[in-house]
Image: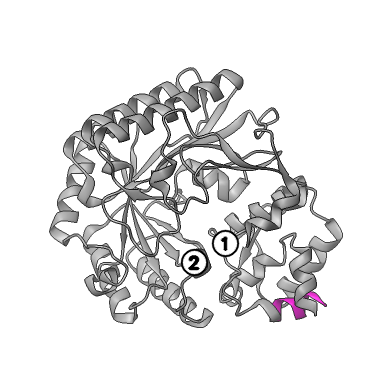
Amino acid sequence: MTIAELFQLRKNDPRWNTSYPLNPSDWTDYRVPDSLSFENDSRMSFYIHIPFCKQLCSFCEYTRMLCPDENVQKEYLLAIANDIKQFRQKYQDITLLGFDIGGGTPTSLSEKNFSLLMQIYQTAISGLKLDDRYEPSIEGTFNTLSEEKLEDMAKNGFHRLSLGVQSSCSSVLHQHQRRNSSEAMMSSWLMKAWGKGIKKVNLDFMYGLKGQNESTIQQDLDLIGRLKPQQVTIYELRTNMILAKESFTKEELYDQYVHYYDGLLAMGYKARFGQNTFSLDAADEGVSSYLRERMLNGAAYKGFGMSAQSMSSSGIAYNEGKLAVVPQNELKSEGYPEQFTYLLPSNELASKYMAISAYNGSFSISRLKDFGFSKEYLNEILDFYISEGLLYKGNHDRVFVSRKGFVHYGALFSLFYSNTQFSQKEKK
């Protein structure tokens, strides 16, 4: 099957997006009983997963649970602190590129436990070299903020706060078991955050949600125009990750993205077409340094907490709780070691890099070559995509998705994946 034929076959298959691998069983042969090695990765990022939420949204694909009582929260945090301590003892020569705290909803912690989280952060970075572009970031929701938490963030060096909105339309949110916050409430908290020293506030929105249309998206844009956050991120709903039965066509999703893109640029936000992050600052990619290094450079990262993912030059690992049906049953006081560790060949690491790069709509040729990507196949696929107007070369060694290519970006990026077995099935 030619590249052109395979691309045609995958164009409208919803499985191809930013997910890789499509099924955990695809990596069964690479699973090992050892922990993931970071011996060759002194430059890395850290991530802490807080799985607690005030409400459970149906579109969320991550490990989460309703926020437990303060004692359970504290026990969870102390377990993470111990995991970080053990990792730091094993790997001491670290240059930290980024540090994200996500979830779940980290700000759903009680004020006392949120303060403990900040102490754990300080201990985690103590004595480490911080990259010149190091910028820690934390996630939250408007209805779990407090002035004390904002002060704690800023005091401990968190000057970027990412708040989930997803949609400003109550009818859309209600279909996904999520309550909306009033504009007055959002505006008030943004002013307080900026006043406390949070320099960058990012608002997350989603498209592809049931009930969304041109009117609801315009409502989102109007809200953004009035609130004027420094950054905006728009995510496409990955229906394959939550087993959703209803979904928009690729063309409909493209139109929704274009509506957001055109509207945001008209308001002064900067972004290249195909990128999902927008910023009022042209020199700012609109992401935390943790995500920037993952998306643009395929850098190593170590995840702490239930189900957190890690990646090094050796492979990828998932902590205990990754496949938990009832996450509450996985809460443990002794810590969250790796449950699934995969020692991956370079072509699989390249595939994972390409999947996360799709969020940015670009990738680095030299980074693919670092992973040992076949030069012959790389040239073949680039020649096809560029000749068809699906990709174009930019400055240095980066390649970008075009407007034409973005319609089927999932299929486009998937041809760089090392999914030989699946491809064989497609050929039959």
Q: In x, y percent, where is residue 334? A: 46, 28
Give the quadrant of the N terminus: bottom right
Q: Amino acid at mark 2?
A: Arg
Residue 4 part of the magenta-drawn span = yes
- Residue located beneath label 2 in the image: 238
- Residue located beneath label 1 in the image: 18
Residue at horizontal 69%, vertical 36%?
Answer: 33
Residues in magenta?
1-8
Local SS, label 1: loop
Residue at horizontal 40%, vertical 70%?
Answer: 207
Q: Nearer the viewer, residue 320 or 289?
A: 320
Q: In x, y percent, where is residue 63? A: 44, 50
Local SS, label 2: loop
Q: In x, y percent, where is residue 84? A: 49, 26
Vertically, is 411 above or below 187? below
Q: Can you see residue 29?
A: yes
Vertically, is 24 above or below 220? above
Residue that sits furthest to the front in the current view:
329
Q: Nearer the viewer, residue 340 or 184?
A: 340
Please identify, in this view, whether the residue under mark 2 or under mark 1 is nearer the observer: 2
Total marks shown come to 2
The colour scheme of the drawn protein is one colour
Query: Pointer 2: residues within 10 angstroms few (<14), some, or many (20+)?
Result: many
Q: Nearer the viewer, residue 382 or 12?
A: 12
Do residues under tags 2 and 1 come within 8 Å of each other at their CB atoms? yes
Measure the C-alpha gap from mark 2 to mark 1: 8 Å
Mostly what secondary structure, the magenta segment?
A: helix
